[in-house]
Amino acid sequence: MTSTRTSPPLRPAARLAGVRAYAPPAPRWAIDIKLDANEGPQPSPAALDAARAVTTNDGRRYPDTRALEATIARSWGVDPERVVVTNGADDAIDRLSRATLEPGRDLLTHTPGFEMIPRSARLAGAGVRTIAWTCGDFPEDAFRDAINPGIGLVALVSPNNPTGGVIPTAAITRVIDDARAAGSVVLLDLAYAEFANIDPTRAFLDADNAVIVRTFSKAFGLAGMRMGYAIAPASIVAWLRAAGGPYPVSMPALAAAQAAWKAGPNEEYSAAVRTERAELTALADRLGLNPLPSGANFVTLRTPRAAWIRDALGSLGIAVRLLGADRQDPLCRITLPGNGADFARLVAAIKTAADPEAILLDLDGVLADVSGSYRAAIIATARTIDVDLTPDDIARAKAAGDANNDWALTQRLLAERGVTADLAAITERFQRVYLGAEDAPALRDCETLIPSTQAVASLAARLPLAIVTGRPAAEARWFLGRAGIADAVRTLVAMEDAPAKPAPDPVCLALERLGVTHAWMLGDTPDDAAAARAAGVVPIGITAPGDDPGASRTTLEAAGVARVLARFEDMEGLLP
């Protein structure tokens, strides 16, 4: 039934103003090493077995958290009524915010910090006051000066997410004391305590205004189970229970957490993380990436190159997290994998991203404008057998990939139109129009150098250059000499030298000939990107003359390049 009256617009509660759903960015690259969410190791087999063992009868009953809470309480030496199991640490934070905050009673925390804390405060209708703490010593004096009776909740995260900074135990104690004097509760988020040099939990178990929040997501490897817990005075635990739902966790998650607690945190993983943390921090420091001191299972880089590091690692299949992209000092947070193979690959990728030893270049579409030569030769060859092809047909085929050999590409385009042609015959016709004959001018004479010779020479002065092309070597050398840039090129890998791109072989051969390991490659097709990535080289895209810039960018980004450049000259701006 439709009303003829005008209805007032639907609107949310005022506390939702400025609050958006939590949505971690989805990488645009194909990722096989995920280091962007600070997730822990593989769960223990006992935990997974326990989750699988949940019976049909168990599944029809509401879960009871009391046994796990008693187990956790015994481990910490506190009464069971002081422990509450929650749906991840986020649930504990949200409950505490609703229990202590309201309009007129604000949150005090540091920034940057765990983003769910101020989010929960705003959803509780409270204001948020922050003290800046990105690096260096914790700003204890400023923090303590900000505590007053108008503060309902003080939140500290140590080790801090996203920086990894650790707040000294003595400083936390003084903050707790000042908060007690002001009638404020302290939230102490210790999600990463297992990775710190010192776990301060026991120092605060007796504080009558402190809520310690821990998680099964990190050292226990149960992020997917969404299990957390809080330790607090019994009176505050009662608030937390009242502020949340009665059955916050599922039966399989509860069973997995019980088994995981019995097995204990993965100490081997934690030890590996500490070792990797030291090694990655030292490497990042040598590379000028300004790593922040960390006590967590990640290392955060505070560098203007943060976005580039994220993009370059993503192009090599490794996801890391960019934070504060709109700031002058953005952060790149890298979760430590905790295993040797992935860490070795991470180290190699960071060296490649931050300190390339060479630049590899595709020839056609990057240095040579072939819109009037090779691409025109494809069209002209097809016309010799009465088939009409267009530049758009060629662009589409190039974007689809596996199109590095123009002779084979011509044959394939003809086959799509129902014309079967021998590759040797196609090659002969193609070369006749490309190289010229007595009765036909040479299309290759139309080729021009896209960047200036000065731009090529300037890049060559910074790093060794190699050409990796699908052209025959003689034709590639002819163009380099004609364009006046042959002396700028250290080595040439051509059609005769290795299998065609997208195979990584020609890229690997270029690295071998140059005697380098870490390099970037500039190309205009998905084949260039695929070959570079497979060889461990950062792929960078550029739009070839004649191609639609928007369509080209979309194609190259889908192929997984780190960046798409508008001009060859922009390459130098990416270099450290």
Image (cartoon, rainbow, N blue to C red):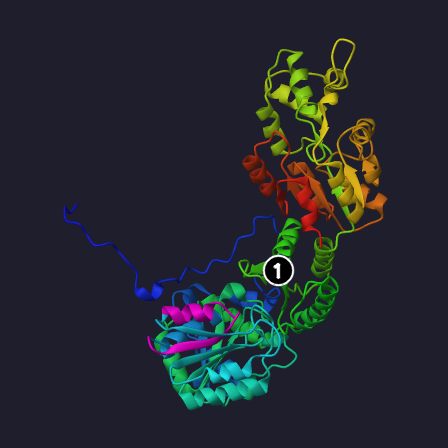
> Would you place residue 303 above or below residue 506 in this image?
below
Location of residue 31 in the rendering, given as x and y in whole percent from the top left corner: 61, 51
Residue range in magenta is 103-123
Q: Residue at x 19, y 52 (%)?
A: 7
- Toward the left, the furthest residue is 4
Location of residue 212 in the rendering, given as x and y in whole percent from the top left corner: 50, 80
In the image, residue 347 lies in the stretch drawn in magenta:
no
Camera sees residue 75 = no
Q: Amino acid at mark 1?
A: Leu
| Residue ID for mark 1 | 35
In the image, residue 110 lies in the stretch drawn in magenta:
yes
Camera sees residue 217 = yes
Location of residue 279 in the rendering, given as x and y in whole percent from the top left corner: 73, 67
> Would you place residue 403 above or below residue 114 in this image?
above
Q: Residue at x 67, y 30 (%)?
A: 403
Question: Which quadrant holds residue 15?
Answer: bottom left
Image label count: 1
Viewport quadrant of the C terminus: bottom right
Circle 1 crowding by C-alpha within 10 Å: few under 14, some 14–19, many from 20:
many
Q: Secondary structure at mark 1?
A: loop
Front position in the image: 231 or 506? 506
> Would you place residue 473 above or below residue 116 in this image?
above
